[in-house]
Each structure stands twice: as C-alpha cells, then as structure tokens.
C-alpha cells in the first residue's frame, strides 16, 4: 500500500464533510544558538543603511548579502530543530537546496519564491557577480518574508501537532487523528475510527521520506481546515503523494 496515496484519497473524498473536533499543542523549545535569524536580519539592515551613507559601498553589499544568507540558513535550521529533525539534517549533511526542497514539498513555500531566492543568491555565490542595489533590496524583502512565513508555520504547527477531525456524514467514519510524534523518529500517525467502531491506522517514519513529507503536508493543511477554502486544501493535498 502506498500510504501517501491512501491518505490523499481519503482526505479528498471526504473533504466536504470534515469538521475540526480538537487539536493539541506543545511549547516551543528554541535552539541554543547564540545568534538567531532576526539578529542576522538586523545586521543586514544596518549594512543596507550604511550603503547609502558610506563611500566604500562594495563592502556593505557583500556584508549585507552574507548576513541575509546566514539569516536564511539559521531560519532553516531553527525550523528543523522545532520539528525534531535537526539532528537528522546534520547527520546527513543536507545542504541549502535540499532543505528548501523539503519546505516546498510540505507546502510551506512556493516554487516561484524559491526560484527568486536562489537566482539572486547564486548570482554572487556561484557566478561571482555583484547584484545591484535593487536586487539586494528585493532579496532583503524576500528573506524577511521567508523568515516570517517560517516563524508562522512553526507557531501554527506547534499549536496543532495533533488534530482530530470529525465527519458530519453519518454514513462515513466518526473521526480521524493525525499526530506528529516528536520523540519517536519522529513519525506521523493516522488513525481512523469508523461508525461501527472499527479502527484503522497508518504510521510513517522519517526514514520513509516521500510518505513522511506527504503526511506532514496533510497535517499542516488539516490544521487550516476551519479557515481555508476546501478547494485550496484539495489543491495542496493533490500534490506530491506518489
């Protein structure tokens, strides 16, 4: 059985009857970094301000870009820390592109935003070209937006790491649970209780990369069930299940 396909088909076929019953949250345990993403953003902003005031502009361009790069890297590592995945990321020595792909695959960032970030970042790092001030300002705004999105995702996820969804269709199931278990791999469990009280459950471990990613995507969007249009949820659930 393809677990991700089963979950996708189940959720999409029942989406019109789903109602959030309850959710559980946990407190944030912040990484013990000396510096955090918004520290690097502050440094980058200072360099942008110095760019307009000082004669030696090149050093401020380079410094600004370096701080923005660190802000991105730090925010990514903070994200994985909160999801209990940081040690796995370090063990496998995952690079920037792989980390960003993970966020794209779970539906946190869009491909277009990722492409814009990478295009400006690569211009200096790989082509050794100096971006102009307009590009730097765009890059700064993109990084600020990216960090804000990830912060919001972390907050929402920690508030809804376990959701219970009921059905208003009496001929269907009674409820299902989706739960992220931080200390068990981590892993994600999916548990259904039918009207006749029969039960069915699935679980995916982090080693099942594709299915784990899809279950996490499903959990994130099920936590938005009360305020996101069903069509939008279906669009996100329809991606990356195979």
Image (tube, rainbow, N blue to C red):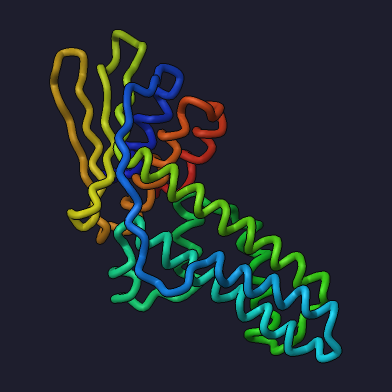
Horizontal relation, residue 14 to residue 180: left or right = right
Relative to 159, residue 150 above or below: below
Residue at image location 50% in from the left, 33% down from the top: 234
Q: Relative to the observer, which residue lies in front, 16 or 45?
A: 45
Rendered residue at 33%/75% (across/down): 90
Is 123 displayed left or right of 135 in the figure? Answer: left
- Across the whole image, how many numbered discs are drawn on residues? 0
- Judging depth in this view, the residue of 178 and 12 nearest the camera is 178
Look at the image and tell me in which quarter the N terminus lies. top left
Q: Quadrant of residue 194?
A: top left
User: Which residue shows up at 49% across the image and 73% down it?
Assistant: 96
Location of residue 46 by image quarter: bottom right
Residue sitting at x 22%, y 28%? 192
- Image coords of residue 17 (percent x, y): 41, 17
Q: Is residue 54 left or right of residue 169?
A: right
Where's residue 173, x and y in %?
Answer: 26, 18
Q: Judge by depth and name the residue closer to the eye, 203 or 3.
A: 203
Most extreme residue toward the top is 170
Residue 111 x/y as whole percent:
60, 57
Q: Position of residue 174 (x, y in %)?
A: 25, 17
* Front residue (pair 199, 66): 66
In this view, 141 is above or below 46 = above
């Amino acid at each position: 059985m393809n677990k991700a396909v089963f979950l996708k088909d189940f959720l999409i076929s029942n989406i019109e009857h789903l109602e959030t019953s309850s959710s559980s949250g946990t407190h944030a345990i912040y990484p013990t970094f000396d510096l955090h993403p918004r520290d690097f953003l502050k440094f980058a902003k200072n360099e942008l301000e110095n760019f307009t005031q000082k004669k030696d502009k090149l050093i401020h361009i380079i410094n600004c870009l370096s701080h923005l790069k660190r802000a991105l890297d730090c925010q990514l590592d903070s994200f994985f820390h909160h999801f209990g995945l940081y040690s796995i990321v370090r063990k496998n020595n995952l690079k920037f592109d792989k980390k960003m792909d993970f966020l794209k695959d779970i539906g946190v960032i869009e491909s277009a935003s990722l492409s814009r970030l990478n295009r400006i970042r690569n211009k200096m790092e790989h082509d050794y070209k100096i971006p102009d001030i307009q590009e730097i300002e765009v890059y700064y705004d993109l990084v600020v937006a990216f960090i804000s999105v990830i912060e919001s995702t972390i907050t929402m996820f920690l508030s809804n790491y376990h959701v219970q969804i009921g059905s208003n269709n009496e001929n269907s199931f009674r409820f299902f649970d989706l739960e992220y278990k931080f200390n068990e791999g981590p892993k994600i469990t999916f548990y259904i209780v039918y009207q006749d009280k029969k039960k069915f459950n699935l679980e995916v471990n982090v080693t099942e990369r594709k299915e784990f990613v899809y279950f996490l995507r499903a959990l994130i969007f099920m936590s938005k069930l009360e305020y996101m249009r069903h069509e939008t949820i279906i669009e996100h659930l329809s991606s990356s299940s195979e």
